Amino acid sequence: MTAIVSPGQGHLLTARGNVMAFKAVADQTGGDFSLMERTVPPGARTPPPHRHVTCSEAFFVLEGTISFRLDDAELTGGAGDFLLVPRGAAHTFGNSGAEPARLLVLHAPAMDAYFEELHQLWSSGEAPSREAERELMGRYGMEPA
């Protein structure tokens, strides 16, 4: 199906207070990549620091400010900034600003199946343990960093 996917639209999932609007998923791309528009509220829980063993990840900041940790570097990205996280690089990110931030996140190959399960893990109404998040991450080729 060919269609324009507007801002904030797509296959919607939530976790860690973030809204993830998937623009493209594995079923549409033959597994080559997945692409999401992610809205990160100020102070939302960050992903545990991790390394992707099986994919690369890329971030493009649309609005707001995102703090990144990439290996030993602390970086800050604003609107228009791009960060490539090569396969195997330790990283995490969050919004320490006062306003929501929006970014595009690309995973190659696709990782949308992980986010489906993460959405389910967070759907109980209370935050899961870090241990539960790490266990889920491990099943999708993400190692603790």
Image (cartoon, helix red, strand yellow):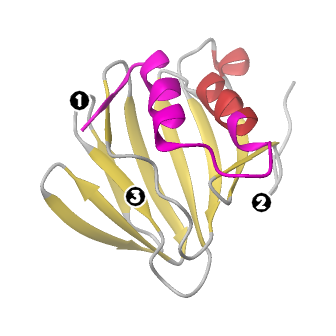
Q: Quadrant of the C terminus?
A: top left
Queried whether the magenta region covers residue 137, the answer comes back as yes
Q: Residue at x 72, y 40 (%)?
A: 23
Q: Decide: marks 3, 2 in contact (CB < 8 A)?
A: no
Q: According to the image, label 3 marks what residue?
A: 93
Position of 116 compared to 96: left or right?
right
Mark 1 residue crowding within 10 angstroms, few (<14) / some (14–19) / many (20+): some
Residue 66 in percent (x, y) is at 43, 69
Label 1: state its secondary structure.
loop
Q: Residue at x 56, y 66 (%)?
A: 44
Residue extending farthest left: 72
Mark with earlier residue (3, 2)? 2
**Disc assigned to residue 7:** 2
Label 3: state its secondary structure.
strand
Magenta range is: 121-145
Q: Decide: marks 2, 1 in contact (CB < 8 A)?
A: no
Cα–Cα span, label 1 and label 3: 16 Å
Residue extending farthest top: 30
Residue 87, quarter of the rendered image: top left
Mark with earlier residue (1, 3)? 1
Q: Quadrant of the N terminus?
A: top right
Q: Amino acid at mark 3?
A: Phe
Cα–Cα span, label 2 and label 1: 30 Å
Q: Which is in the foreground here, disc 3 or disc 2?
A: 3
Q: How many marks?
A: 3
**Disc assigned to residue 88:** 1
Mark 3 residue crowding within 10 angstroms, few (<14) / some (14–19) / many (20+): many
Cα–Cα span, label 3 and label 2: 21 Å
Residue 16 in percent (x, y) is at 62, 54
Q: Which is in the foreground here, disc 2 or disc 1?
A: 1
